[in-house]
Amino acid sequence: MTPLQPIQTFGRYIQLMGKVFSWPERFRMYLKQYVKEMYQLGVDSILIVLLISFFIGAVICIQMKVNIQSPWMPRFTTGYTTREILLLEFSSSIMCLILAGKVGSNIASEIGTMRVTQQIDALEIMGVNSASFLILPKIAALVTMIPVLVSFSIFAGLGGAYAISYAGILTPEDLTYGLQHGFNEWYVWMSFIKSFVFAYIIASVSAFYGYTVEGGSVEVGKASTDSVVHCSMLILFADIFLTQILS
Amino acid sequence: MIELHNIYKSFEDKDVLKDINTTFQTGKTNLIIGQSGSGKTVLMKCIVGLLQPTSGEILYDGRDFVRMSKKERMLLRREMGMIFQSAALFDSMTVLENVMFPLDMFSSMTLSERKQRACQCLDRVNLIEAQKKYPDEISGGMQKRVAIARAIALNPKYLFCDEPNSGLDPKTSLVIDALIHDITQEYQMTTIINTHDMNSVMGIGESIIFIKEGREEWVGDKTQVMTSTCQPLIDFIFASDLLRKAREANLKI
């Protein structure tokens, strides 16, 4: 890799985004795609988000109880720290890292396959702005659905914590008190704002890797892997800045 | 009518197309023939605008495609239909949705009119019964016929076919050739077909350009192919199955 390569890649990404954010030729068709993508990228991810969040919520609760709780600490500490971790990092950043794997690879491989099977060329020949038609609805759909997924993740995580409390690790009353203690509504908004940025990164970066595939199935696989790696790195990088700015 | 004037195309230091000058007539099936790697796909991609020629002019009924603005290009492309080697059907859509796609995108018809037009096109290629199937549920030959139906949905002026018989058995190839030929005359389109199939050459080659190593070597029609004295073309024919047929017919090569 030459030192100029990341700059060239970034330049190509900006050029592609220039094509993506153009006025839709036929709004009705974009709307149809948008609804389809909301289902494919958002609704289809709900189950995995619920499942992972439930178990991680439960594990966080156990870890907090085992490692932090002591006779010198207030009894609500476990609930309080569980809530803070879920709201501030897990349901926005870590969930988006997981979605970068599921949704990002899906986007990159779908668009990459369309590229190598000449479906994108077919769109271009018809006079369709293929970049905009394929990528814009995906970005819009994921950005729309991400607050829903984050909300589901928060509630499923809290559900996991309650499940553990009913299993006898701590009392539900202490957990409830801890969850409510010193609640700052801004943290929920912060979580949503971060997830909007991460959703844009996942959809646009994955689409870029898929759209620029050259070759065959091996390259599609490579693009899919590259998209997950780069999305994850960018999410972690953006997380530092966003946390600093929004806190 | 599509005219090519002094078309050159290079990739880095490799010249792939060298001084191509030809005219593709309206209402005729114009064939670009040559061996694999001769530059015919690159030429086709330059003609449809998927690649930019290094120099030269491509005139669509007098309109210079190379130098026109992006917007004009987009508009001109709506007058084109293309059949790809792999058919390139949208695999997330049914056969009917594939044919309706250009109509949904660019026509001002109502939904029922668009459906009716798409069914007409499918009926024209004898595939009306497959309208609810997905591309992976139909055969390669049927996929090519759906691609033809999609290409003609908007009544294009120009039809491009990149190796339309690739991967098909000889009988299905004849059906596809006949369909493209009939549709060309019916819609009075300028049709350009990229092929190395000599059966297609002898069947529908109303105008033929033979390319070798990116250079235009011979121009003629199917009646002149077997009597040509162009050595590269003779070598090309020798390499094909047609030689046997020519010998059977006692043609002098």
Image (tube, coloured by chain):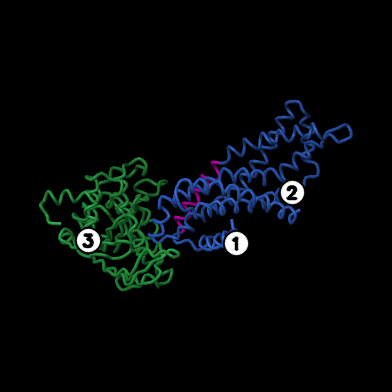
Chain colours: A blue, B green
Q: Quadrant of the C terminus of chain B?
A: bottom left
| Dot label at residue A185 | 2
Name the residue at the left extreme. B250
Question: For the residues carrying marks 2 and 3, which lies nearer the camera in this image?
Answer: 3
Question: For the residues carrying marks 1 and 3, which lies nearer the camera in this image?
Answer: 3
Q: Is residue A9 left or right of residue B84?
A: right
B78 to A153, vertically: above or below: below
- The segment highlighted magenta reads A27-44
Q: Secondary structure at mark 1?
A: loop
How many numbered markers are drawn? 3
The amino acid pointed to by label 1 is Leu
Q: Is residue A239 left or right of residue B97?
A: right
Q: Quadrant of the N terminus of chain B?
A: bottom left
Q: Main secondary structure of the magenta part?
A: helix
Q: Is residue B37 visible?
A: yes
The stretch drawn in magenta includes residue A33: yes
Q: Is residue A175 left or right of residue A204?
A: right
Q: Which residue is mark 1?
A: A4
Residue A16 pos. (x, y %): 52, 60
The amino acid pointed to by label 3 is Gln
Q: Report crowding for label 2: few under 14, some 14 to 19, many 20 or more residues within 10 A (C-alpha).
A: few
Q: Report crowding for label 1: few under 14, some 14 to 19, many 20 or more residues within 10 A (C-alpha).
A: few
Residue A142 pos. (x, y %): 57, 50
Between the C-alphas of marks 2 and 1, the distance is 44 Å
The stretch drawn in magenta includes residue B83: no
Q: Residue at x 79, y 31 (%)?
A: A66
Question: For the residues carrying marks 2 and 1, which lies nearer the camera in this image?
Answer: 1
The amino acid pointed to by label 2 is Glu
Q: Is residue B70 left or right of residue A157?
A: left
Between the C-alphas of marks 1 and 3, the distance is 48 Å
Mark closest to the chain's N terminus, 2 or 1: 1
Q: Which residue is mark 3?
A: B231
